[in-house]
Amino acid sequence: MNITVVKHTGEDTGRKITLSKEVFGIEPNDHAIYLDVKQFLANQRQGTHKSKQRAEISGSTRKIKKQKGTGTARAGSIKSPIFRGGGRAFGPQPRDYSFKLNKKLKELARKSALTYKAKDKSISIVEDFSFEAPKTKDYLKMLSALSLDNKKTLLVLPTSDKSLALSGRNVQNTKVVLADMLTTYDVLNADTLILSEGSVEKIDNLLKK
């Protein structure tokens, strides 16, 4: 697939880039995508939820009524889960939600997500650029020039660029990432991928192995 390279000001450079079939043109694997996204979201969970069990509730341990003759069920403690203010039975406890996935499966998921974006023609390629100083206004101008100001975008850079990262940090519905930090979730979560020219080669080198 050939995509025209444009400047960040929206002007056509007259050049085209061919996206490799090994990365942007495979047979997508939906289950690999599901597992990778599931792992990403699970890893975001803190797992610090906690409820008190009956042993952790403060209160008297006195037997609240006699064992027999009341006509009701026996009860030994006010901290029992069946009473208001008692401990919670089977409540959430701190835990780690993360799980392991094989490296090849995660690579397959990323290639599948990139393939879907290529099929949907939701990839724009811009000539490598940078801002002289961090300015949100300049970032918004770039999105407007590319006719992407009303879409959720993901800008992928080949190397770290502090000016671009700070410029896009406060812009709603946009994210700036490095090519080697690209995740399946980020790709699918964006309406359009904005790939800088240098990042295309870097993504190919990472996923063609």
Image (cartoon, rainbow, N blue to C red):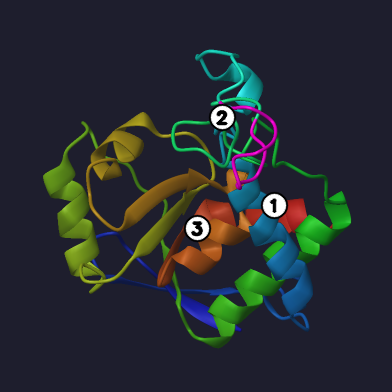
**Which is more foreground, mark 3 or mark 1?**
1
| Magenta highlight: main SS | loop
Mark 3 / mark 1, whichever is N-terminal: 1
Disc sitting over residue 4 in the figure:
none
Please, what secondary structure does the residue beneath circle 1 have? helix
Q: CA distance from mark 1 to mark 2?
A: 18 Å
Disc sitting over residue 48 in the figure:
2
* Residue at the image point whose x is 69% and y is 31% from the top: 67
Q: Compare residues 149 and 16 and report the one nearer the observer.
A: 149
Q: Quadrant of the C terminus?
A: bottom right
**Circle 3 is placed at which residue position?**
197
Count residues near mark 2 (Cα–Cα under 10 Å), then give few for <14, some for 14-19, many for 20+.
few
- Is residue 70 on the magenta stretch? yes
Instruction: Decide if residue 178 is on the left or right side of residue 29.
Output: left
Q: Is residue 11 above or below residue 59?
A: below
**Which is more foreground, mark 2 or mark 3?**
2
Mark 1 / mark 2, whichever is N-terminal: 1
The type of residue carrying mark 1 is Gln
Q: CA distance from mark 3 to mark 1?
A: 29 Å
**Which is more foreground, mark 1 or mark 2?**
2
* Residue at the image point whose x is 43% and y is 66% from the top: 190
Q: Compare residues 52 and 12 and report the one nearer the observer.
A: 52
Q: Can you tell which quarter of the image residue 163 is in? A: top left
The type of residue carrying mark 3 is Glu
Q: In the image, residue 117 lies at what x, y percent?
A: 54, 77
The type of residue carrying mark 2 is Thr
User: Which residues are the magenta region?
Assistant: 65-75
Please, what secondary structure does the residue beneath circle 2 have? loop
Disc sitting over residue 39 in the figure:
1
Q: Quadrant of the N terminus?
A: bottom right
Q: In the image, residue 119 lies at what x, y percent?
A: 57, 86
